[in-house]
Amino acid sequence: MYPVTPNETSNLTELIPLQTLFKNKKVVGMGEATHGTKEFFNMKAKMFKFLVMHCGYRIFSIEATFGGTLKVNDYVLYRKGDILSAMKGMEFWTWDTEEVRDLIEWMSTYNDGKPDNEKLKFYGFDCQSFKGPIDALIDYVNEFDKKNLNEFVKGFQGLNDSSILYYYKIKPGNLQGIAQIHSIISFLQKWFQGYETLYIIASGRTKFELAKHNIDNLEQTILIKEKTERKYDYIRDSCMAQNIKWIYELEKTPVFAWAHNGHISKVPSFLKISECMGGWLNSIFGTDYYNIGFVFNQGSFQAFYKETKKVQECSVPKFEKNTLTNELSLAGIDAFFIDMVTSNNKLFRKSRKAYWIGAGFAQEYWNRCSPSLIMKKQFDGLIFINTTTCAIPINRKLMN
C-alpha cells in the first residue's frame, strides 16, 4: 500500500517506489470511476508526469476522437493555435476541465526547446465521430495541398452535416446515410493512394500516416453505426484497442491510456456483455499492459444529470453496501495505491461492491451505481480515494 496525494501534481517523489512496475511496460491504462472527478484527473496527470520524468514515456492518449485531438497534439508540440479551441475539438465535454487543460499546458511547457524525437505527444483513440476525422483531413490537405483543397472538399458533399450531432443521426436503418459515408471513405482512400508520394514529400511520413489514420477512424465509426446496439460496446472497445496498438507501433515507445474503468478493465464489467478495451489490450500486449482502476468512498463529481438534462455537480454518500470501499476506508488513509499483482489480500479476490458511474447520473438511483466486482480480475493496480470533489469545468465566457 502506497499513500498518494492526488491533487498535489508537482511532487512526484511519492511514486518513485512504483518505478519498477511501469519501467518496461508498453501500455499503462488508467481508469476512473466517474467521468468528472478532480482527484481522478489530477492523479492520472500526476502518474503521466511520473512516467515521463522517471520511466521515459512520451505518448499520452485519451478516450476522445482521434482526429479531434490532432489540434491538441499540434498545441503540445508547437504551441500552434489556441488551447481552448483545440480542447473543444476533442468533442468530449468530460475533458473540458481545468485539470485536463493544466496537463496539456504542462506537456507543452515540457516540450519547449526539446528536439522533436524527445517531445511529448497527445492522441485520442476513440471512434465516435464523423466530424473529427473529416476536419483533420481537410486541415491536412489545406496545409500541404492547398491548390487541390476545393476539389478535395467536394468529395464530402454527401456528408452535408459534419457537426457532432450528425453522428447520432446515423442509425442502422439509415441505409442512405450509411451508403453516403461508405462512398466518402472510398473517395478518401483513392485520394490518399493517388497523392501518397507527393504528400509524404510535402509533410513527412509521420504527418501523412496521422492524417491517413483518420480514414481508418471513419471506417471504425461507420462500423459501429451499422451494427445493432447490443454489439456497440464490443466493436467500439475493440477499435479503441486497435487504435492504441496503432499509436504504439507508429511511435515505437510506451503509451499512457486514459479512459473509464469500464474500458481499461481486463474483463467485462457489469455494464458490458463482451470484451472491453483492456481485455483486447491484454490479448495484444500480455503482461506488457498494466492497468490501474479507481474507486472512491463518497463525494462529488461532474456528470450529465438526467433530471435537468445538464452537466452539473452531482454527489453520492458513503454507502453501507459498498463492501469494497468501506473496508478500504478502514485503513485511515485518504488516498493510496495498491499493486494487486503482488497483493495476497483476499478482499480483491471476492466480489465486492463499489461506485461505478459514467458520464450520466440520476440522483434518485445513486444506490444502483454500486455493482459487484472482483478487482483482482479487472485491474493490476487500484487507487482508492476516500472523498472526491468535482472536476472544474472551464468557464469559457470568463476566459474569452
Image (tube, grey):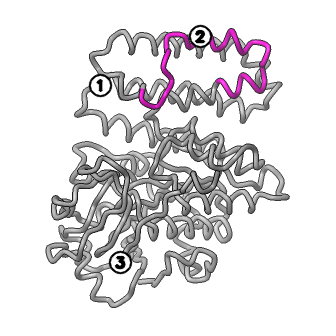
Where residue 167 sits, quadrant-wise, is top left
Q: Which residue is drawn at 46% across and 35% down?
A: 127
Give percent across and percent down for residue 322: 19, 73
- The amino acid type found where label 1 is placed reads Lys
Q: Tag 3 or tag 1, which sits nearer the N-term? A: 1
Local crowd size for mark 3, using a 10 Å CA cut-off: few (<14), some (14–19), many (≥20): some
Location of the N terminus (image quadrant): bottom left
Give percent across and percent down for residue 15: 56, 78
Give percent across and percent down for residue 221: 43, 28
Q: Name the residue under label 2.
A: 155
For marks 1 and 3, give the one nearer the viewer: 3
Q: Distance between the residues labelled 2 and 3?
A: 52 Å
Q: What element carries label 1?
A: loop
> Magenta part of the protein: which range?
138-165
Q: Which residue is drawn at 63% across and 25% down?
A: 137
Looking at the image, residue 200 lies above or below residue 361: above
**Residues marked 1 and 2 touching at CB (< 8 Å):** no
